Image (spheres, grey):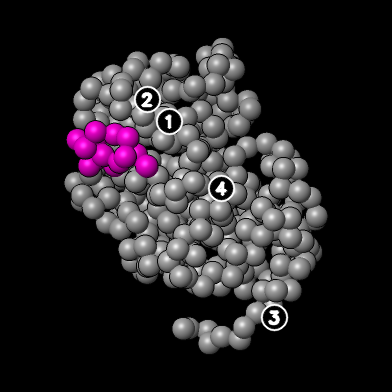
Amino acid sequence: MKHVALLGSGSWGTALTLLLARKGIPVRMWSCERQQLEQLSALRENRDFLPGHLLPDTVSITGDMAEAVAGAEAVVLAVPSSAVREVGEQLARACAGLPLIINAGKGLESDTGLRLSEVLAQVLPRSLSERIVALSGPNLAVELANEVPTATVVACSNEELSIAAQELFRSRSFRVYRNSDIVGVELGGALKNVIAIGAGIGDGLGYGDNTKATLITRGLAEMVRLGTAMGAQAQTFQGLSGVGDLMATCASKLSRNLRVGISLGRGETLEAALREVGQVAEGVPTCRAAYDLSRQHGIYAPITEQIFHVCFESKSAIHAVIDLMLGESKREFE
């Protein structure tokens, strides 16, 4: 492979850069942040977001989108959901060939509720939008960088493109599966972040494993209801982008969304919680989008609703829990 353009210099983008470079694949890592560019170029290390890992010599650093994507056989987007539209627009102007487009971000566009591949499809020419593959799974950046064995899933309706993405990322520490249900894979990777905030709220309130198990199980039920209403396959949520990512994100202290929830459970404001985390927590903007989507589709989503009230309407965490516990009695499967 000539080279891969990796768009994004956060912890996730850096971890994916390391994975590819360790396979001997040349990577051009792009960032729009001047301070990040200077640090990465001078130190060959992302001390802000993923310290302790030197970038191999096969990684070049650039702030020029055209330089990053020129001649690339694959372009990997690892940017926050809020930046996908703008970065996609820059990519559309700079890209002259037909590389494989892999979106490795997890989230929904807050204002529109669109999946990230849908956002990219709106701004990229059709020749490129038809080449989008989504990557999602229980993939904490620090563990991936440390080569801890893990698995992920790539999704696209085009089997040939899925196989290409699968082969690009597979390594001795990163097992890659493929799935044709891009709707479900993207929604799984996005919605689990909302549930992780809820798991963190429970931790912040001092609750135990019973609470977390209940929250994950009923949160998964909400994900399936909303996902299938939006065209996803229910089975997808039993896989890596659903159950797998839920387990990692709701349990690991490395999870930004869990940490945001812990702060909320302790009574801190959302603004204070986000400052404490110091990085983008995708569950926050996704919570707003998921709340709006559940209402649009008439989906019963009480957990998402209560997390929305805590995040955006200053509802106390304990009152949110009480309202969930005393809500209308239901059959488990209905």
Q: Is residue 150 magenta?
A: no
- Whether residue 265 sits left or right of residue 249 in the image: it is right
> Between disc 2 and disc 4, whose residue precedes?
2
Pointers 2 and 1 in contact (C-beta within 8 Å): yes
Magenta stretch, overall SS: helix
- For disc 2, the marked residue is 90
**Cα gap from disc 3 to disc 1, whole angstroms:** 43 Å
> Between disc 2 and disc 3, whose residue precedes?
2
**Cα gap from disc 2 to disc 3, whole angstroms:** 49 Å
- For disc 3, the marked residue is 326
**Cα gap from disc 2 to disc 1, whole angstroms:** 6 Å
**Cα gap from disc 3 to disc 4, whole angstroms:** 27 Å
Three-letter amino acid code of the residue under disc 2: Gln
Q: Residue at x 79, y 50 (%)?
A: 268
Identify the magenta region: 119-132
Q: Residue at x 52, y 14 (%)?
A: 41
Pointers 3 and 4 in contact (C-beta within 8 Å): no
**Cα gap from disc 4 to disc 1, whole angstroms:** 16 Å
- For disc 1, the marked residue is 86
Three-letter amino acid code of the residue under disc 4: Pro
- Decide if residue 315 is in sight here: yes
